[in-house]
Image (spheres, rainbow, N blue to C red):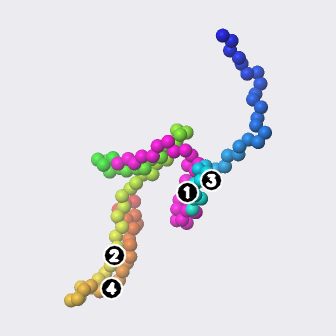
Amino acid sequence: MAVSKRTHRPTPRANPKKKTRSKPDMEPDAPELPDPPSSSIHFPEVTGKTVARLYYVNDAPNDWQSLDMCFTDGTFFSLELTPRVDARACYEKLLSDGVETIRNYGIIPGNAPGDGGG
């Protein structure tokens, strides 16, 4: 049985398909994606990748959780989920017919400086 060898490079296509990273490949009849909120964080490395598997990890004994996206190119993106508690702080006075708020401090985030978390 004879084995053929290529003696020349393949001829390039006249109009090669351009790859863009700005927008992911969308299904033909998929709706237009809305603009993300201004408070969102963009992860450009994963834009346009094909997801092979998406799973949630809950390692309860070690108090560790994550959401992992595995892509068909062998890379993956992981969001580690860290528990956080926010507190609403108010200074109030007890009255005979209810409670009077003297000062409302609002929400105090769980990651505020001095909370021992960082």
Q: Amino acid at mark 2?
A: Ala
Marks 2 and 3, how far apart at CA: 43 Å
* x, y percent for residue 28: 61, 51
Q: Report the magenta residues as a range.
A: 35-58
Q: What number is the disc on residue 23?
A: 3
Q: Secondary structure at mark 4?
A: strand
Q: What number is the disc on residue 89?
A: 2
Give the mark, 2 or 3, whose residue is nearer the N terminus: 3
Q: Amino acid at mark 4?
A: Ile
Q: What number is the disc on residue 42?
A: 1
- For image coordinates 21% across by 89% down, the residue present is 96
Q: Residues within 10 Å of mark 4 (few under 14, many from 20)?
A: few
* x, y percent for residue 84: 36, 61
Marks 1 and 2, how far apart at CA: 32 Å
Q: Secondary structure at mark 1?
A: loop
* x, y percent for residue 69: 47, 46
Q: Secondary structure at mark 2?
A: strand
Q: Is residue 31 visible?
A: yes
Q: Quick check: 20 left or right of 30?
A: right
Quarter of the picture containing the C terminus is bottom left
* x, y percent for residue 70: 48, 43
Q: Amino acid at mark 3?
A: Lys
Q: Is residue 24 visible?
A: no
